[in-house]
Amino acid sequence: MSLSLSPAEAGKFAAARRSVDFVEDGMRLGLGTGSTAAWMVRCLAKRARDEQLDLLCVPTSEATERLARALGLTVTTLDEAGHLDLTIDGADEFDPSFNLIKGGGGAHLREKIVAAASQEMLVITDPSKDVAALGAFPLPIEVLRFGLASTRSQIEAVLAEEPVAKREIRLRGGNDPLVTDEGNFIIDAHLGRIDDPEALAVALNKIPGVVENGLFLGMCRTIVIGREDGSVETRTQDGSKITD
Ligand code: 5RP
């Protein structure tokens, strides 16, 4: 692929291109959502075409499904595929323990279901997402439309009890709310810093109107970080680091 990319896109592309090296013939794959994942889908489709790979792909959003189908990848549902070998997805933030915030693209519900059904989750990202503690990026919380005001109040009550730096919540899209692929709304929680992601994730998911939060805890073991100069760093949770 010969491309002229902005520095930010060049990093995403570098990570995406490297991530498809992890794909093997015959795999069942989860395809993430977002701009980095879209690069991965393009690179994957090229590799599948060039090497005649037999792959079965489960997209995590309607947008990814459209792209994957348009590029000739074989797409199926998670129910049809059953267990997946590998999911490759982007992230909005990752911390030193490989915990993530996802859902900036509004797809974290399907993304979490697909990642949970996968043997491995590989995250592709750029250095801007690397944080010491999660929370500068607003935490997406997918909620049912029914009883929205009540769910909002209960989220505020949970946040009042949790160790976070600030507690401001906003319905994504405001007066014209974004509707997710599953027909729900998203509340973005501006928290500044999340000191106890595990406790927060559990407390939020106990609220009946909350469908799923964007904290991905203990799900990812490998992170591929692409830089604008085209170099790539691959970190694994056991502490290994390869840069090339
Ligand atoms: C979508 C996501 C994305 O992976 C996340 O928002 C990163 O997106 P991008 O690669 O465009 O920066 O979680 O719900």
Image (cartoon, grey):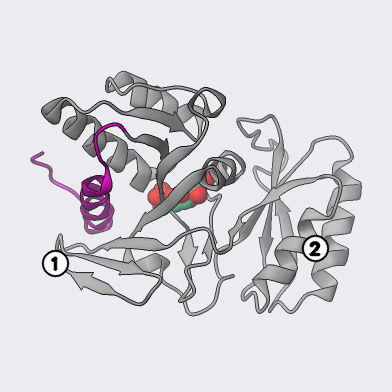
Q: Which residues are magenta?
A: 1-26
Q: Quadrant of the N terminus?
A: top left
User: Which residue is more in the foreground, 30 or 1?
Assistant: 30
Q: Which element carries disc 1, helix, strand or loop? A: loop
Q: Is residue 13 magenta?
A: yes
Residue plotted at (73% across, 59% down): 169
Residue plotted at (40% across, 22% down): 75
Instruction: From the image, give the main secondary structure of the stretch colored magenta.
Output: helix
> In the rendered image, which quarter is residue 126 located in?
bottom left
Label 1, on which residue?
A: 244
Q: Position of residue 16 (x, y in %)?
A: 27, 49
**What's under tag 1, amino acid-wise?**
Asp
> In the rendered image, which quarter is residue 165 located in?
bottom right
- The 10 Å Cα crowd at callout 1, few under 14, some 14 to 19, many 20 or more, is few
- Tell me: 74 left or right of 177: left
Label 2, on which residue?
A: 203
**What's under tag 2, amino acid-wise?**
Ala
Q: Quadrant of the C terminus?
A: bottom left
